[in-house]
Amino acid sequence: MTHSTPPPPTPSPLLSEFSNDPEMAELIESFTSELPERVQAILAAVGEGRVSDLKRLSHQLKGAAGGYGFPTLGEAAGRVEDGLRATADPTTALKAIAEDVRALVDLCTRASAGKS
């Protein structure tokens, strides 16, 4: 008898703290609809070793996320930015923040899946 491993659970969508505010709905939708593009830019910057671009992208996301009701997303972007600032050598910096980047990408994916 073989035992199959169940698939990993699908992460729950990350919803904005303002998701119940009708006045914020359109703004949140705009923000979350841009997240897949931001993720692609972040992954491209990591893949190409463009530390300065990654710093800029994470800084922008850190600033914007809280305003749209995603403080966890902003904190994750801040960890990426801080990790890059903490290490002068780009290769070392990218290795040091690899897990933080994965966490940030996951949160962006969950927020864009929530759409509110």
Image (cartoon, rainbow, N blue to C red):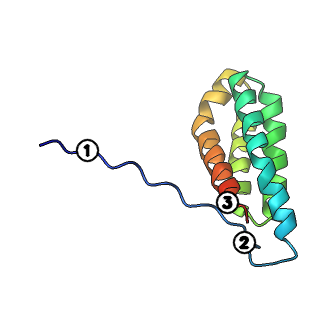
Image quadrant in which the N terminus is located = top left
The 10 Å Cα crowd at callout 3, few under 14, some 14 to 19, many 20 or more, is some
Residue 4: mark in rendering:
1
Q: Nearer the viewer, mark 2 or mark 3?
A: 2
Left or right, 12 with reference to 42: left
Residue 72: mark in rendering:
3
Q: Amino acid at mark 1?
A: Ser
Seen from the viewer's position, the closer of residues 109 and 67 is 109
Judge whether residue 81 can be spotted in this image. Answer: no
First reached walking from the N terminus: tag 2 or tag 3: 2
Left or right, 106 with reference to 20: left
- Give the residue at x 68% y 47%: 79
Q: Residue furthest left?
A: 1
- Give the residue at x 81% y 61%: 29
Residue 52 image-quadrant placement: top right
Vertical comparison of 70 with 94: above or below = below
Vertical comparison of 116 with 84: above or below = below
- Give the residue at x 67% y 29%: 93
Q: What residue would you read off at disc 2?
A: 17
Residue 15 image-quadrant placement: bottom right
Q: Nearer the viewer, mark 3 or mark 1?
A: 1
Q: Amino acid at mark 2?
A: Glu
Separation (CA) of disc 2 from disc 1: 38 Å
Give the secondary structure at mark 2. loop
Separation (CA) of disc 3 from disc 1: 34 Å
Give x and y (percent) for residue 21.
80, 78
Separation (CA) of disc 2 from disc 3: 10 Å
Vertical comparison of 4 with 68: above or below = above
Q: Residue furthest front?
A: 1
Give the secondary structure at mark 3. helix
- Give the residue at x 80% y 37%: 55
First reached walking from the N terminus: tag 3 or tag 1: 1
